[in-house]
Image (spheres, helix red, strand yellow):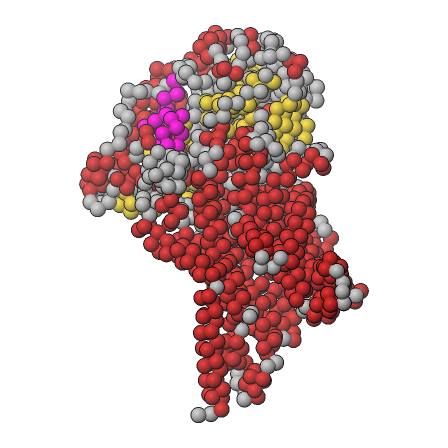
Amino acid sequence: MEHMGNEASQGLHLRGQFTRRQIVGASIAIPAVGVFLAACGDDKADDKADDKADTKTTGVSGDSKGGTLRLATTKPAGPLDPIAMDDLGSYNVIAQTFEYLAGAEGDDIGPSLATEWTANADSSEWTFKLREGVKWHDGTDFTADDVVATLERIASAGDGLGGSLPTEDDPDAPPPEGDASPAQRLAAGTVTATDGLTVVIKLGASNASLPYLLCIYNPQSAITPKAFAAGSTLDGSPNGTGPWKLDSYDPTTGAKFVRHDAWWGGKTPLDGIDMQFFADLGSQVTAMSGGAVDAIQQFSVVGGDALLSDTNFNTVEVQSATHRQIWFGFDEGQFTDQKVREAFALSIDRQELIDTLFSGRATIANDHVIFDLYAFHDEGAVTQRERDTTKAKQLLADAGFPDGLKATLNAVDVQEIPQLAELLQSQAKEGGFDLTLNIESLDTFYGTQWCVSYPCAGSAELGIVDYGHRPTPDVYLLKAFKSGGDWNSSQYSSAELDAAITEYQASAELDKRKAAAGKIEKIMWTDIPAAIPYRYNNLGGFSKTFTGVQFTALGHTLLGKAAKA
Amino acid sequence: MLRYISRRVLLSLVTLWLLATIVFLITNVIPTDPARAILGNTAPEASVIRFRTQFGLTDPLIRQYGRLLKGLVTFDFGLSWGTKREVWSLIEQPLFRSAKLAALAMAITTPLSIFAGLIAAKFRDRRLDRGIVLVGLATSSIPEFVTGALLAVVFGVNLHWFKPVATIPPGTPPLEQLQYLILPATAMTIAYFGYIARMMRAGTIRALDSDYVRTAAMKGMSSSQVMTRHVLRNAIAPTITVMSVQVGYLFGGIVGVELVYNYPGISQVVLNAAKKKDLPVLQVAVLIVALIYMVATLLADIIIAWLNPRARLELGQS
Amino acid sequence: MTDTDNILQRSVAERKQARRENWRLLRRRPGFIIGSVIAGFWVFCAFFGQRIAPYDPFDYRDTKQLSPNGEHWFGTDKIGRDIFSRVLTGSRDVLLVAPAAAVLGVIFGSILGIFMGYYRGWVDNVLSRIVEALLALPVVLVGLLVLTLAKSSNLVIIFVVAVLFMPIVARTVRAAVISERDLDYVVSAQLRGESNIFIMTREILPNITPPIVVELTVRIGYAIFTVSTLSFLGVGIQRPSPDWGLAISEGRDVLPANIWWLVTFPALAIATLVIAVNLVADSIQAVFER
């Protein structure tokens, strides 16, 4: 929020001795949860209700005003199944009604349903202290049993927090059909409620990042009541703990929310939210600039001109790790030679991409995923790769392509990616690459060009794929770059990198983590499984007739503190 | 007349059956993997197999075809693959919305273009006529999604006269809904005005040139009497036919307009269902739109037959 | 020389004469001249657009979203490419796809129509039902459906649009054939024992060329419209083509910022091409129906 330094230091001493802060720290000027500075009022009194029973809100501006906020969001792609949902539209509906053990705070995570969390020495056993006085929308109390039930559901119906939760076969489950894998259930004693408000999680292996798997940035970990049945949808049984009760939900038009009076965060200044679903950015921008909505969940610089130049509109820019990977095939094709990959990376004019596609609202990246916004980023590990087309041509010649190289650049038609592909085509030409573009819709791309068969074989030799924000790079590393990762479209396999990732994951202390991260940076920068030209900031915004609308780096809109100006 | 109508209705049923067959073929001849598309790339093979059995995707095609036909007869189309809701419940509201927009567009276009057509014919080859014809040709050559986008920006964003998007909050009274629908309807009017006016003009000219009109004029009827009694009646027949055809086009042309105004109509259902390979929804949605077109042409033919008994004979044979 | 040859030769000569006469009348119509010139310009651009364009439509980068000025007559787009150059080259795909679809649709439709009109009876009855069913399918909606289910490519677009245009052509051709088939020359050919295929292709077809030509020009106009709409919807011609429909969909989101030149110029290009084709179609129709 608006007093970053302040908040960060508060966070440090309020929580247990082993908080995420100590691992990650906070060093970025622009917070990951953004509120437009000028729009928010006065002092730290209106900071989010912190730990303990401190739920008072002095409100950004008088609580009595009430009113409804009309929010433009992307239409949910499918049913609101807490496990299967995988799109921002769904996440944002859920985030109004349901909450997570950890929420968004500054550029990191902070207390939400859990007020503090601690781990044992090797991060294999975690204790979460839950917030007191939290009520479900139906009036019942939120207890540790609800958390245990949620984790059991995630273990049996989902991936068990990326495989972190130890599971065993479920003898009571119906016999599997065909080559089905057996139904799973949480291994006995994995998750226990030691008292009404304490949950202990025993992991199979050390994981210093566990709270990140139980936070708002891992939307599938939303906490549901004990009575919630696996397989049902969240709009079907919308009993959450969040500030907004789901009043009506229509998957094609929108959702209406009304205030949850007993919310632990205090009385919301607004009476309700009118969420409207949109199929594309163009109509969202039109609606926002025409005053048909009061806030827009997310927009891009390309195409967002009308909003960026609107004086009645607050643009909220949030630092995020959202980035694009230009992957190179390691298994076959023309990019198996490191020289060719380096030549491609050297052809990219990163600054031009950022200027054209983001009007500067992005940060140069260096072909690895330990971005500068992570506290353990080691800036000394590798130098920034700069454009050098002469060297690129030389490398191509050395690799056996003295007359340049012809290839198809595959890309998915999402946000700025088509324009990125067109710019890359143009830039790479000067480095000796004659690229043909194949830009495919979201619906076919992932099945035909990227990770055609599970776990991620058959990808094209060259392509651009999108990665959303994560508060730590674990998911990128494990899924896209570790040997056999199920998003590893490069088919990249390096024992060295795998070892560095393991070292990174087991290192809880910042120094050790930084050392491991530096190794990762160096290996990725040298091998170049993917060129990563930039990471960019998430943009959302709202009309100046409102205050206190918050946006997360992933693209949630948080409205518990929003009010009419 | 009754025999004519019942014959036409019966033939329409045959056409509907053929239509269902065609739509079934289209959606099944294209190789797709609905289970994968719906469950996602990374879903385990087990749940994909479970999905296929659950929704009968492994059944022989003839059985799936039978299910579609049975659905059409009983009006129970089963569950959508993607959302697991009733197919009809996913189509009903969007269809109603599209129909509402199409009806409004027709309500504006029809009197306007009939009037323009009559005027143009009356002042045939004069400047007014040339002007109407030219305007009609020009406006119908600009795609409706362009007109729609421009109207939204000018009258919605810049002037704030109407809503720039058609996201009508539930429970809005009908008159207030106009605020949201007027711009998309106008965009469609601009696109279709020219064509209908042209047909009306041609029909009127043909009627004006015909013998009976000349006779009537010679008998000393006033020109307005001739216009209403003879010309209008005969000129309107081809226009009605065109309008009934336009109903089909409206449901097609509406696609771009619905996108521009973010209006959750039938085209969004089709687009989303096609993306998810949700074949039951896709089949029923397209069939219903085709059915509306068939009903419209049927009604048009009946009206024409009623207006002009001579045409009945000709129509009866086709 | 037999009688048959004589009749055939005479009718060939007559048709040649009629063609010359039609051509003479056509050239006198201002609509035809204007339409042909504009359409001809776009066809020329489809072939040579990239050579006459002042900048490289794909590989040119200047300041983005510059408003129209002396250097960039139509301004620049989202990544700074010259819109004038892109509009000039933007006709290439649509002028390949749309006429191909129209021609194919007219060929399919004519074959079907001739069969229906010539054989009548149950052949006609059955095919008529199918044609009527196909006619009820909304073109854009079904195009959207097929191109989303299948992977979009120029070939698929051509085929889909052609099939969707087929029924309406078939209906027109059938009507024309019905009015021909009881005429003397058909009857005498049947009496001579000519095969049905021969009569359909060599006797009837030449005599129903006018309505087919009219249908073709009209369908080309519709095809341009349909293909542009599908491209706008994202299922038609694919990036990085400078196609007009695609350019409109790319430029739509900056319209509220009053950056109008991204949408307006490609839209005007579509409009001029469609108007031109319609003017030509109208003139041909007027001459044939005189």
Q: Position of residue A415 (x, y in %)?
A: 45, 35
Q: Which of the pair C159/C281 is nearer the observer?
A: C281
Q: Position of residue B43 (x, y in %)?
A: 51, 40
Above or below, A320 against A326 in this view is: above
User: For the point 54% across and 32% down, which residue is it?
Assistant: B158
Q: For the N terminus of chain B, which image quadrant? A: bottom right
- Residue A68 in sight here: yes
- Taken as a whole, is the magenta stretch helix, strand or loop? loop
Q: For the C terminus of chain B, which image quadrant? A: bottom right
Q: Is residue A30 left or right of residue B45?
A: left
User: For the point 56% across and 10% down, which residue is it?
Assistant: A46
- Residue C107 in sight here: no
Q: Which of the pair B37/A497 is nearer the observer?
A: B37
Q: Quadrant of residue C120?
A: bottom right
Q: Which residues are magenta?
A: A353-375
Residue A370 falls inside the magenta stretch: yes
User: For the point 69% across and 34% down, which residue is it?
Assistant: B176
Q: Position of residue A211 (x, y in %)?
A: 49, 20
